[in-house]
């Protein structure tokens, strides 16, 4: 098998593995909830913490880390090189954000990206984790996640990290901003001042409302019925 074929197969496998929605499965199995209808509507560890059970964030977080770390590690193990390993891990991030098995409605991919960094550049994983922890401590991790990603290439350059880190972070930034704007196909307000405000909030704060607490604690309207569980958003 050629290196090109091996890389293509690993990227495809990374996407399919990334598409396994651990947060959704845990919320369904443990509480019968469709997590897409709660809080931000994302299939993420933070929504598991808020709406399912705090203990559940551990298996969900570890699985999400592993599903990007594994294809990246396999890329190195099979001698495909750092770029192929990075591409496979980023494919898992894309699968997590737009999972094939749930109509392309997923999470934000930061846990997956941490898993990729653990393989390619462990110091980068600690760096990004520190920013996320600071954001969590201050009650709003979205802007801190962007700050961590934007400064990560500087860290890699300063301490001699792999050259692949900068393009991988660039790709992760594009995936992050695209997902924030797309917001699991949640509709935007009509064109006008509120439309512009929502766009800016999505880009920088990863939400549609001014209040972070109000956003993450949203619950479905009981009158919506079960059919609403299948609606995107």
Image (spheres, rainbow, N blue to C red):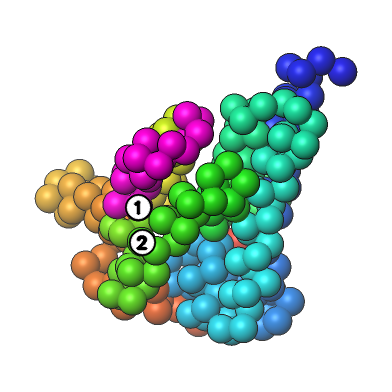
x, y (%) of residue 146? 33, 51
In the displayed structure, 184 sits above or below 219; it is above
Q: Residues within 10 Å of mark 2 (few under 14, many from 20)?
A: many
The residue range painted magenta reads: 146-165
Who is closer to the viewer here, 44 or 166?
A: 166
Quadrant where the image shows the N terminus: top right
Tag 1 and tag 2, C-beta contact below 8 Å: yes
Q: Residue at x 33, y 69 (%)?
A: 134
Q: Residue furthest right?
A: 1
Who is closer to the viewer here, 225 or 1?
A: 1
Q: In which quarter of the view is residue 170 placed?
A: top left
Q: Residues within 10 Å of mark 1 (few under 14, many from 20)?
A: some
Q: CA distance from mark 1 to mark 2?
A: 6 Å
Q: Residue at x 69, y 52 (%)?
A: 67
In the displayed structure, 157 sits above or below 17; it is above
In primary-sequence order, the first of circles 1 and 2 is 2
Label 1: element kind: helix
Label 2: element kind: helix
Residue 25 in sight in this render: yes
Disc 1: which residue: 148
Residue 224 in sight in this render: no
In the drawing, does residue 203 fall left or right of residue 222? left
In the drawing, does residue 15 fall left or right of residue 232? right
Q: How many callouts does the rendering have? A: 2
In the drawing, does residue 92 fall left or right of residue 183? right
Q: Residue at x 21, y 67 (%)?
A: 210
Kindly report the secondary structure that dominates the magenta region of the rendered protein.
helix
Disc 2: which residue: 131
In the displayed structure, 5 sits above or below 38; it is above
């Amino acid at each position: 098998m050629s290196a090109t074929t091996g890389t293509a197969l690993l990227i495809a496998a990374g996407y399919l593995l990334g598409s396994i929605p651990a947060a959704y499965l845990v919320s369904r199995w443990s509480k019968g909830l469709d997590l897409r209808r709660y809080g931000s509507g994302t299939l993420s560890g933070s929504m598991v913490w808020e709406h399912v059970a705090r203990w559940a964030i551990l298996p969900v977080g570890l699985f999400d880390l592993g599903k990007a770390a594994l294809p990246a590690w396999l890329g190195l193990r099979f001698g495909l090189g750092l770029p192929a390993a990075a591409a496979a891990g980023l494919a898992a991030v894309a699968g997590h954000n737009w999972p094939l098995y749930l109509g392309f409605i997923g999470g934000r991919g930061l846990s997956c990206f941490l898993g990729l960094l653990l393989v390619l550049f462990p110091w980068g994983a600690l760096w990004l984790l520190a920013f996320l922890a600071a954001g969590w401590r201050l009650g709003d991790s979205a802007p801190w996640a962007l700050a961590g990603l934007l400064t990560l290439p500087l860290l890699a350059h300063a301490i001699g990290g792999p050259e692949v880190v900068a393009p991988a972070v660039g790709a992760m930034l594009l995936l992050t901003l695209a997902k924030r704007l797309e917001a699991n196909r949640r509709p935007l307000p009509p064109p006008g001042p509120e439309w512009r405000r929502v766009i800016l909030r999505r880009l920088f704060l990863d939400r549609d409302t001014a209040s972070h607490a109000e956003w993450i604690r949203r619950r479905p309207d009981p009158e919506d019925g079960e059919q609403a569980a299948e609606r995107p958003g």
